[in-house]
Image (tube, grey):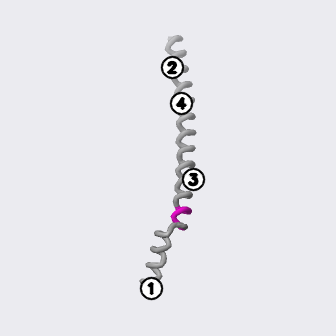
Amino acid sequence: MKTLHIVLREILYRLKTDYKRFADAVKNRKANTAKIKGELYSSESNSLLFQMYLHEEEDLFI
């Protein structure tokens, strides 16, 4: 019974540490994804294609 307790305690400890590493990886991935999306949107606003679409919408309302 004592051996079982030691084994279970070790398994639970490993699961907790792995969970923390996994949660940190997910959090970092979300931050990186948000950063990449921000860079894409900022570069789109400067592109010629985006400016053409912007003028096309203005022509529809005139």
Dot 4 corresponds to which residue? 18
In this rendering, the answer to whether 39 lies above or below 8 is below
Element under disc 3: helix
Dot 1 corresponds to which residue? 61
Magenta region? 41-45
**Disc number for residue 35:** 3
Element under disc 4: helix
Q: CA distance from mark 2 to mark 1?
A: 69 Å
Q: CA distance from mark 1 to mark 4?
A: 56 Å
Neighbours of disc 2 within 10 Å: few (<14), some (14-19), many (20+): few
Comes first in the chain, label 2 or label 1? 2
Comes first in the chain, label 4 or label 3? 4
Residue positioned 54% across, 62% down in the render: 43
Q: CA distance from mark 2 to mark 3?
A: 41 Å
Residue positioned 57% across, 53% down in the render: 35
Marks 2 and 3 in Cβ contact (< 8 Å): no
